[in-house]
Amino acid sequence: MCWIKKAIRGGFIVKVVIIGAGKVGFQLVESLLNENHEVTVIDSSQTVIDKLMDNFDVLAIKGNGVSSSLLKRLDCGGADLLIAVTNSDEANIVSCITAKSLGAKGVIARVRNPEYVMELEFMQENLGIEFIINPELATAQEIMRLILNSHTSYAADFAKGRVRISEVQINSTSNLINRQIKDIDLPLSVIITAIARNGEVIIPNGFDYIYQKDTLYVMGKKESVNAFAKGVGVQMISTRTKNVLIIGGGKTAFYLAKELEHIGVNVKIIEENLERCRELAEGLNNTLVLHGDGTDIALLKAENIEGMDAFVASTGFDEENLLVSLLAKQLGAKKVIAKVSRSSYTPVIETLGIDNAVSPKLITARDILRIIRGGKIVSMSLLIGGRAEVLEIMPREGTPIVNKPLKTIGIPKGVIIGAIFRNGKIIIPNGDSIIKSTDRVIVFTLESHIERVNKLFNAKGGSLSIYELINSAKDSGDFAPM
């Protein structure tokens, strides 16, 4: 079966087979179906299959994704992309090799074991696996970025560090409470793209009010966003990060400690499992590994929690991570980061005062979605539990967004052209602004509108082969296989 060339409202359909429907697989199914791709799911659990069938209009099959006979029966050889995200690295690798031998155009394997990290290049070059995703490594790199960020709250940079989107939490002392946006003295180079309130996402206009416990998502020139955030109470960290305490000694903690050791940061890990403590101590060079309960207040105080520049909760339990993060914040840790997998906890996190929350499943989904989508997506962030995205896109010549005043294009509410990067300069656009094919465009969009964004930035009827998509992701310059 050849590459599917079905134009869909100016976009394209990719036939995707997903093996394994855990947290990452479930998130991928939801995101891909929202973009009208053809999705088939294979999972060994009937309970998981039933959950998928109850929630989505998707072909879900109970079976073993390693089985060549099952892959043949489901015509996986005709797939544009097969994504293997089961809990077994070995099964994921075998499934990808089998699918590739059957004729699948592209394959992605989730590989998590640190022992395999040194073999990733070999697997890509010799086994034909185009991309290998390591969620724990990617999560550690995201936490590392947050630790080194001068904001205590979430911030992400685009356009080679010139454009920033920052999360601004409105506390009881903010001077923005009960004010309309039109009455706020916003810098000309800053816009409020969204407000998260009580679990809802609001795309505001000038007449919307800001209330206590709101979370604002502010975009613009980096220095202007920083100034605005600082002016409304976001804590800025001026000193270099020297001391980090990590609770939970899983793979993410291991990768993070390795990264921090490399730049000379003092790292402590508290882990309950004694055997795991021994493994960490053997695998790390300068990290102090402590056997104990990370929720023990006496232990946290004994390990100088108040002197920590950053505190990371990375156990395997969301509830424990949230609890210990609150404790760390109350005990004086400067920056607190919690690993949280469940999207349903996002509204709770917004009100707890935790500085940052990272989701391995969203990070993995982000990386895979960048491969699948058309256009040259240079960088991408998923926000508000995956309900919104920020994309840095290099538009194609001949697409609806190019060479026309923005006010004439019909950009829907929920899609915001936040900034244009052109010839080393940042342009904050208005209705008269024109995008060129040589620009980089920073776009904020609700997940429900991503298909409209695809339509604006992709040539009409212009389907792309999976090879073009993968090469586009590789050539963008800011994306590295995990």
Image (spheres, helix red, strand yellow):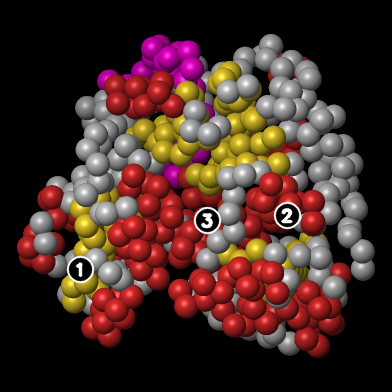
> Residue at image x 82%, y 30%?
397
Q: Secondary structure at mark 3?
A: helix
Quadrant for residue 282, please give it. Answer: bottom left
Residue 163 at what x, y percent from top left? Answer: 50, 29
Residue nearest the observer in this picture, 408 or 465: 465
Screen quadrant of the C terminus: bottom right
Q: Is residue 306 left or right of residue 280?
A: left
Question: Is residue 260 shown to the viewer in this render?
Answer: yes
Which residues are drawn in magenta? 175-202
Q: Name the mark on residue 470.
A: 2
Q: Is residue 165 left or right of residue 442?
A: left
What is the crowding at mark 2: few (fewer than 14 residues within 10 Å), some, or many (at least 20)? many
Q: Left or right of 46: which side holds 231?
A: left
Q: Is residue 151 depicted above or below 145 in this figure?
A: above
| Label 1–label 3 contact, CB within 8 A | no
Q: Given the image, on which type of amino acid does mark 2 rest?
A: Ile
Disc with the residue nearer the chain's start (2 vs 3): 3
Report helix, strand or loop for mark 2.
helix
What label sits on residue 27 in the rendered view? none
Residue labelled with disc 1? 288
In this picture, is 307 found above or below 284? above
Q: CA distance from mark 1 to mark 3?
A: 30 Å
Q: Earlier in the sequence, mark 1 or mark 3?
A: 1
How far from the left and from the top, in percent, is residue 170?
A: 32, 32
Horizontal and vertical percent position of residue 62: 69, 82
Name the one closer to the observer, 392 or 129. Answer: 129
Residue bearing the label numbered 3: 362
The residue at the point 41 percent across, 59 percent down is 140
